[in-house]
Amino acid sequence: MKPFEGFTAETIDFLWELRMNNSREWMEENRDRYKRVLKEPFDSLAAALVAESIAFGGREMKCSVSRINRDIRFSKDKSPYRASRWVVLYDAALQGTAWKERPSFYFELNPEGYEHGLGMWCSPSAFLAAYRRKIESNPAAFERMAKKFEKDPLFRLEGRAYKKFKNETLSPLLQAWYPKKDVLLVARGGMEDILFSPELPQFLAEGWSRLKNFYAFLDAIEAE
């Protein structure tokens, strides 16, 4: 596999064209181009991030790169392809699809730009209950960590929240974190020079290093 050399203008052109021509006929005509300008660079980026994973995750990690095909079985949108692509980094000890229920780092490229950060999207209810209990067990420690992200110029707390879970004994800051259904710390950017640079893996790893303590907090949770 070639080292990651940065995405190209043709990568972005391909994503825009796919969005505007989302059909199997168009994809078959552009299959070789897809492999050259999107699939191969993403695979190289994923390998570079795995090599950096101990620095930002504190342990060896594996990766999963999204498929270009969409699962349209239960979707009203029958577009067969995604006009974006992402890579997820997770604990190498996890097997199969278990990573989907655990915290992971991610990077996504789309026609408008990119986003990256740390997240949990498919956490089971037992895990989220344990997450809330852990906040309640030591709110002062969690607040110290949350305050750092309040001041962070890059990452922002996002994600859906349950309306039914409230704890009015917690501070207003912690009440933003406590009822989360999706726990996400997200940074976004447009068509910046870093996307087209071989330094992108190091740029992401440096950013994710700022999330290491929160990753460790989530990773230590054991759902009952």
Image: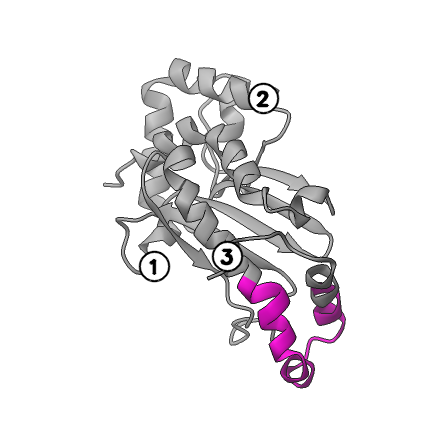
- The reply to whether dot 3 and dot 1 touch (C-beta < 8 Å) is no
User: What is the C-alpha distance between the residues marked 1 and 2?
Assistant: 32 Å
Along the line of sight, which residue is nearer the eye, 111 or 125?
111
Q: Is residue 172 above or below residue 105?
A: above
Name the residue at 70% across, 49% down: 113
Residue 87 in view: no
Q: Which residues are magenta?
A: 15-40
- The reply to whether dot 1 and dot 2 touch (C-beta < 8 Å) is no
Q: Nearer the viewer, mark 3 or mark 1?
A: 3
Which of the marked residues, 3 or 2, is nearer the chain's N terminus?
A: 3
Q: Residues within 10 Å of mark 3 (few under 14, many from 20)?
A: some
* Mark 1: amino acid: Thr
Q: Is residue 196 above or below residue 205?
A: below
Badge 2 is on which residue?
A: 150
Name the residue at 53% across, 19% down: 148
Q: Is residue 115 left or right of residue 137?
A: right
Which part of the image, by quadrant, shows the C terminus?
top left
Q: Residues within 10 Å of mark 2 (few under 14, many from 20)?
A: few
Magenta span: chief secondary structure: helix
> Quick one: SS at disc 1?
loop
User: What is the C-alpha distance between the residues marked 3 and 2?
Assistant: 33 Å
Along the line of sight, which residue is nearer the eye, 25 or 194?
194
Residue 54 horizontal/vertical position (percent): 36, 37
Q: Can you name the residue that lies furthest to the front here?
A: 2
Badge 1 is on which residue?
A: 97
Residue 170 horizontal/vertical position (percent): 46, 18
* Mark 3: amino acid: Ser
Q: Nearer the viewer, mark 3 or mark 2?
A: 3
Which of the marked residues, 3 or 1, is nearer the chain's N terminus?
A: 3
Badge 3 is on which residue?
A: 44
> Quick one: SS at disc 3?
helix
> Quick one: SS at disc 2?
helix
